[in-house]
Image (cartoon, grey):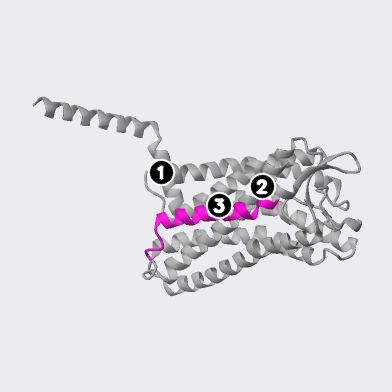
Amino acid sequence: MSLLQSSNATPNGDQNTTNGSDRHPENLPEWFMAAIPVYILLISIFGIVLNVFILMVFCFHKKACTVAEIYLSNLAAADLFLVACLPFWAAYIIKDYDWPFNGPMCKLVSLSITTNTYCSIYFLVLISIDRFVALVHPLSNTRMRRPKFAKLGCLLVWVFDFLLSIPMLMYRKLKLDEGNNTLCSFEFPTETVYLLYEGTISLFIFIIPIFIIFFCTYKIVRGLNARLNSQKTEQKATTLVLAVLLAFLICWVPFHLVRIVELVLVLKPLAVRTAVDTCRMIFLYLGFFNSVLNPVLYVIVGKKFRKKAKELFSQWSPVTLRNDYTSSEVLRSMKTVEVSN
């Protein structure tokens, strides 16, 4: 199933439509459902604060970002947009899956969460390729590792993942359920469209990216073992990237694996589909935690990032600002004396 859909998509009688109700599986305990909004709100608060901090360091530091930092800053931006929209979904759950906002907000929130999740995956792909080129082919591809190409790559990722998320605008709608609740749910016209959409998303958002990431990571580890005493700067950056990749694999791979299993079992008995659906829902909320974990890893693992953060805040300290002001006044006075002479 797609992100933020927690029910079983099944053919609807003779009309052969695939309807998605976003109500949670009935076999989940009440305490679990009560804890989900609290969990989402905590992720949102910590994710917003930490990712804003990461972006401040990357954007306001006096030194220009490296290629790896351009990718990491875009990853932080995607995480920020994602966690900023989660409180709307928490409100939806608190109201027992009765959407409290209007139809356009249903589409917009779903689109933002989905797009930024997809972007996070492809920024990790770009990061993996960059580390692969830096360590395995450091001389032959130096022209490719330029900031302007990195920015272009990030722009293409944003556009590509927005295009993949267009079905959110087309098929995400409001509808009334049996209990007269207003659901923000998927409404596919046919089962074929549903299977085509899910198959495409699984291919482009999981299978292809994971293959690229695993291939690059394997080559990166081999490259690190072959260069234990050289390229220390690249090795430090690569250590951070490997930590971020590991966090992504832990947080998101279970969800995508269950998603593929659910796609295969879409026509299986209801009990089987409900069990798979429950696992998918749990792993989805685990995946959201990745947006909080990434900025924590920047601080814990990224020595260069910690250095940039210290330099940035030292720039903003009162003593530094006063010294800068004094220095500028001295320079102006010297220029005035030179002109008068």
CB atoms of marks 2 and 3 within 8 Å: no
Q: Is residue 224 left or right of residue 159?
A: left
Whether the magenta-drawn stretch holds residue 332 is answered as no
Nearer to us in this view, 175 or 60: 175
User: Range of the magenta residues?
Assistant: 142-167
Q: Secondary structure at mark 2?
A: helix
Q: Amino acid at mark 2?
A: Leu
Q: Is residue 15 left or right of residue 128?
A: right
CB atoms of marks 1 and 3 within 8 Å: no
Q: Nearer the viewer, mark 2 or mark 1?
A: 2
Q: Which mark is residue 61?
A: 1
Q: Image quadrant of residue 121?
A: bottom right
Residue 30 sits above or below residue 143 on the image: above
Residue 341 sits above or below residue 2 on the image: above
Q: Amino acid at mark 3?
A: Trp
Query: Mark 2 and mark 1: span between their CA atoms?
Result: 32 Å
Residue at the (50%, 44%) spot, across then down: 55
Mark sitting earlier along the chain (2/1): 1
**Secondary structure mostly seen in the magenta stretch:** helix
Q: Nearer the viewer, mark 1 or mark 3?
A: 3
Q: Residues within 10 Å of mark 1 (few under 14, many from 20)?
A: some
Mark sitting earlier along the chain (1/3): 1
Residue bearing mark 2: 111
Residue bearing mark 3: 158
Q: Image quadrant of residue 89?
A: top right
Mark sitting earlier along the chain (2/3): 2
State whether residue 239 appears in this view: yes
Q: Secondary structure at mark 1?
A: loop
